[in-house]
Image (tube, grey):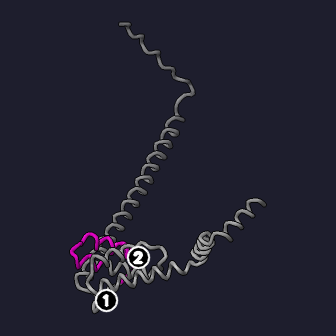
Amino acid sequence: MVFITMLYRSIIFKPAALTLILVMSFTISAPGFAQQSSAQKLKEGIQLFEKGDLDNAISVLRSCARNSDLNKEQQSKALICLAQAFLAKGYYNQAREAIADLLKIMPNYKTDPIQDRPQFIRLVEEVKQEQKTEETTREAKRSSEKWLWIRGGAVLAVGIAAAILLGRGRNEETITLPYPPTLPEK
């Protein structure tokens, strides 16, 4: 009870504490607020890109692409603009990474030959082809490993069957092996 009284007095007599509590409760109770600011940030990044301010656009779009508050469509827009900004700056590896991230979110992404630049279209197709090749290689490796286990199991089964079948024809006598000779001491 004493604690509650002290808390009550500190809140009433200290407006800064009351303001802090109100701000914290607003922040916690307004999850849509973060979504709105993230969407605004994405819009800002796209505008920076369209104006040609590529360095600032890359900075803003990079944070938007990694932002879990945005939905998949918004993240994909950020990644598309980010890849195009990287291409405009000549950063092909970063553009390739952005496109790979885009294809993870939207595997069936199709470029627009009217709106997209030919360089962007070619890079998207290259990354798609690389991903298909990697997937084919992974599937072949898994298949190869599977057959290795199957073949190994078959060889083991044949070996056990042969040992059982060949062992039946012998007498039931036990064969004792001689003791090994004693080694001279040094």
User: Label 2 is placed on what type of residue?
Assistant: Cys
Q: Is residue 77 left or right of residue 90?
A: right
Q: Main secondary structure of the magenta part?
A: helix
- Circle 2: element type: helix
Q: Is residue 185 left or right of residue 127?
A: right
Instruction: Look at mark 1 in the image and give the residue it sits on.
Output: 112
Q: Give the farthest residue toward the left.
A: 90
Where is residue 180 shown, x and y percent of the image?
A: 43, 15
Task: Find residue 1 and report its image quarter.
Answer: bottom right
Regarding residue 131, the answer to whether it shows in the image is: yes
Residue 164, above or below 78: above
Looking at the rendered structure, the number of numbered marks drawn on it comes to: 2
Q: Nearer the viewer, mark 1 or mark 2?
A: 2
Labelled pair 1, 2 in contact (Cβ < 8 Å) = no
Which of the marked residues, 1 or 2, is nearer the chain's N terminus? 2
Tell me if residue 104 is in the magenta stretch.
yes
Crowding near the residue tagged with mark 1, few <14, some 14–19, many ≥20 C-alpha atoms within 10 Å: few
Instruction: Look at mark 2 in the image and give the residue it sits on.
Output: 64
Residue sitting at x 36%, y 76%: 60
Q: Of 60 and 126, which appears nearest the observer?
A: 60
Where is residue 39 shown, x and y percent of the image?
A: 45, 82
Q: Is residue 119 left or right of residue 6?
A: left
Image mark for residue 138: none
Q: Of 26 and 107, which appears nearest the observer?
A: 26
Task: Find residue 28 and report its image quarter.
Answer: bottom right
Crowding near the residue tagged with mark 2, few <14, some 14–19, many ≥20 C-alpha atoms within 10 Å: many
Residue sitting at x 25%, y 84%: 52
| Quarter of the image where the C terminus is located | top left
Q: Which residues are magenta?
A: 83-109
User: Label 1 is placed on what type of residue?
Assistant: Asp
- Circle 1: element type: loop
